[in-house]
Image (cartoon, rainbow, N blue to C red):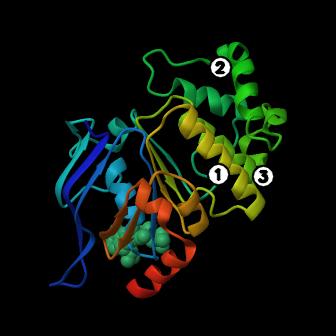
Amino acid sequence: MSVLEMRNAAKLVNNGPKEKKALLDHIDLSIQKNDFITVLGGNGAGKSTLFNTISGTMPLSSGKIFLEDKDVTQLSEENRASFLSRVFQDPKMGTAPRMTVAENLLLAKGRGKKRRLRLRQLKQNLDHFYQITKEVGNGLENHLNTPAGDLSGGQRQALSLLMATIQTPQLLLLDEHTAALDPKTSKLLMQLTDQRIKEQQLTCLMITHRMEDALQYGNRMIVMQKGEIVQDLNEEEKAKLSMTDLLQFFEEIN
Ligand SMILES: Nc1ncnc2c1ncn2[C@@H]1O[C@H](COP(=O)(O)OP(=O)(O)OP(=O)(O)O)[C@@H](O)[C@H]1O
């Protein structure tokens, strides 16, 4: 059983009165459990559209999406949120700025649960929150009582990642989540990302413009162009790929 399956999925928009433009051009994609897929493609290739249609923020024009064999094509974004987590490029998204780090984590831990965790349960969870923030390696554990809005961009993105993975989602969507960070901070967050994915055996799609990351991480790589998946490399093919090959490939398709 696939974790996610897209069949003949298309997103068309009007490009002038008589012309339709395909943001997603009838793609087929099957994602298996524990796949960690890096997603590459130039600006406007359709990567975010892919994520938007998977998470339900954008309905498909035609085709179908299945999550663990369940047809979710018509399911709202809210209803898909119980099995999907997404981290965005912008550190401001995904965290509540006036709530503290610990409160944000508690919110994420209780999300979708029948009995929500209440603020008075914060104390009981502090040990757990201390442990997971300490693993980040950027001092986040010393800021459990700091409002998220006062964190550095790197700390806030690490918090977003922890929030997105605190409940082990069936599918994790990383939308250029390191793009706004400096190289050192980005590297640290990528290491944390890889560690969380391995430890929790997550299934993940990660959009990135950093080719080194696309090569170094994950067991599969897809390349998008003009709304289509033009390359889908498995673990073996990906392992053989060098930076030179990849650069050459992008020269050819652009
Ligand atoms: N709602 C919309 N209506 C019309 N066109 C749109 C809409 N949303 C996106 N587009 C266009 O669709 C194309 C694909 O956009 P998308 O954001 O998916 O690309 P991307 O691969 O994520 O690019 P980037 O790397 O720049 O983030 C772009 O040309 C964009 O301008």
The residue indicated by pointer 3 is 152
Mark closest to the chain's N terminus, 1 or 2: 2
Query: Few, some or many C-alpha atoms within 10 Å of disc 3 (few <14, some 14-19, many ≥20)?
Result: some
- State the residue in front, 240 or 246: 240
Q: In which image quadrant can residue 46 be found?
A: bottom left
Q: Nearer the observer, disc 1 or disc 2? A: 1
| Residue at image location 73% in from the left, 20% down from the top | 126
Query: Few, some or many C-alpha atoms within 10 Å of disc 2 (few <14, some 14-19, many ≥20)?
Result: few
Q: Percent position (x, y) of residue 208? A: 53, 63
| Residue at image location 34% in from the left, 39% down from the top | 80
The residue indicated by pointer 2 is 119
Left or right of 5 on screen, residue 130? right
Numbered marks: total: 3
Between the residue at mark 2 and the residue at mark 3, the CA separation in whole angstroms equals 24 Å
Q: In which image quadrant can residue 128 be found?
A: top right
Q: Percent position (x, y) of residue 63? A: 16, 56
